[in-house]
Image: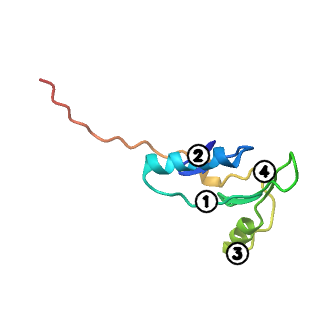
Amino acid sequence: MLWHMDDQKISHVSKDIVSSEINYLSKKYGKEAPLTRGKVHRNLGMVLDYSIDVKVQIRMNDYIDGMLKTITENKSGESTTPAVNHLFTKKPRQYTAISIRIR
């Protein structure tokens, strides 16, 4: 069983074990989660495809296509890092005065 924030992935050879875990979690947390069963799943912008035994194919075509559609300016050129320039700019520290009364 894997968790990422509020997303879970449950895998097991036995479908009954998976169903049992889903029922347990639904009862414990009081709601049914959206559920997919089978060899292909969409999660966190990825398509996880388990169609081939002992392998997983991970695709992000739809996510990348959607991201590219949002880019409006020409992005030609080269960069030494994928990070944005302001990532390495130091901001001046801002302090907040805190008053504590001790008795």
Q: Residues within 10 Å of mark 2 (few under 14, many from 20)?
A: few
**Which type of secondary structure does the marked residue at label 3 adopt?**
helix
Marks 1 and 2, Cα distance to the nearest angstrom? 14 Å
* Residue drawn at point x = 51 percent, y = 47 percent: 25
Q: Residues within 10 Å of mark 3 (few under 14, many from 20)?
A: few
Looking at marks 3 and 1 on the same chain, the residue that comes earlier in the sequence is marked by: 1
* Residue drawn at point x = 57 percent, y = 49 percent: 22
Label 2 vs label 3, nearer the camera: 2
Mark 1: amino acid: Leu
Which residue bears the numbered disc 1?
Answer: 35
Rendering coords of residue 49 (x, y %) = 79, 57
| Label annotation for residue 20 | 2
Label 3 vs label 4, nearer the camera: 3
Looking at marks 1 and 4 on the same chain, the residue that comes earlier in the sequence is marked by: 1
Marks 3 and 1, Cα distance to the nearest angstrom? 29 Å
Q: Residues within 10 Å of mark 1 (few under 14, many from 20)?
A: few
Marks 3 and 4, Cα distance to the nearest angstrom? 24 Å
**Which type of secondary structure does the marked residue at label 1 adopt?**
loop
Looking at marks 2 and 3 on the same chain, the residue that comes earlier in the sequence is marked by: 2
Looking at marks 1 and 2 on the same chain, the residue that comes earlier in the sequence is marked by: 2
Which residue bears the numbered disc 4?
Answer: 80
Looking at marks 4 and 2 on the same chain, the residue that comes earlier in the sequence is marked by: 2
Q: Height in image: 50 above or below 68?
A: above
Label 1 vs label 4, nearer the camera: 1
Are the two marked residues, 4 and 2, in contact with CB atoms closer than 8 angstroms?
no
* Residue drawn at point x = 68 percent, y = 61 percent: 45
Q: Identify the residue at the far top of this view.
A: 103
Marks 2 and 3, Cα distance to the nearest angstrom? 42 Å
- The answer to whether residue 8 is left or right of residue 97 is right
| Label annotation for residue 69 | 3
Are the two marked residues, 3 and 1, in contact with CB atoms closer than 8 angstroms?
no
Q: Residues within 10 Å of mark 4 (few under 14, many from 20)?
A: few
